[in-house]
Amino acid sequence: MRSRKNNTTLTRKTDKWNPRKVWLIKRYADGHYAINQEVGGRVFYSSYQRTTKAKVEAIFSHC
């Protein structure tokens, strides 16, 4: 987990079935979340997708 100057935390979590895929999870100071993927060392999507904490937990409940 990495904390930034603007109180944003970035967490990297490796996918269970594909070790080349890493989930990038941002948690902002106001409490909302955003996710993106990194595949083979490169960020897959050009921007983060805003999501809820429940969606993040659902993704990793079977990862």
Image (tube, rainbow, N blue to C red):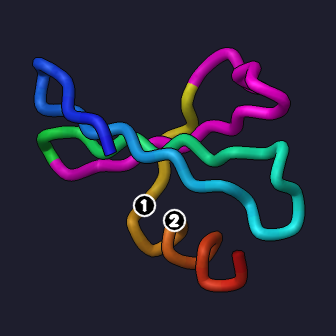
Front-most of residues 58 and 1: 1
The magenta region covers 31-47
The residue that disc 1 covers is 52
| Circle nearer the viewer, 2 or 1 | 2
- State yes or no: discs 2 and 1 in contact (Cβ < 8 Å): yes
Q: Return the x and y of residue 51 as percentages of the image width and height.
A: 48, 52
State the residue at coordinates (68%, 45%): 22
- Is residue 63 placed above or below 37 in the rendered structure? below
Is 53 inside the magenta-drawn segment? no
Q: Which mark is residue 3?
A: none
Q: Amino acid at mark 2?
A: Val
Point out the image quarter for the N terminus. top left
Q: Residues within 10 Å of mark 1 (few under 14, many from 20)?
A: few
- Is residue 52 placed above or below 11 in the rendered structure? below
Q: Amino acid at mark 1?
A: Thr
Q: CA distance from mark 2 to mark 1?
A: 7 Å
34 horizontally vs 47: left or right: left
Q: Quadrant of residue 44?
A: top right
- Is residue 26 placed above or below 7 in the rendered structure? below
Q: Return the x and y of residue 12 as percentages of the image width and height.
A: 51, 46
Is 45 inside the magenta-drawn segment? yes
- The secondary structure type at the circle numbered 1 is loop
The residue that disc 2 covers is 56
State the residue at coordinates (57%, 54%): 13
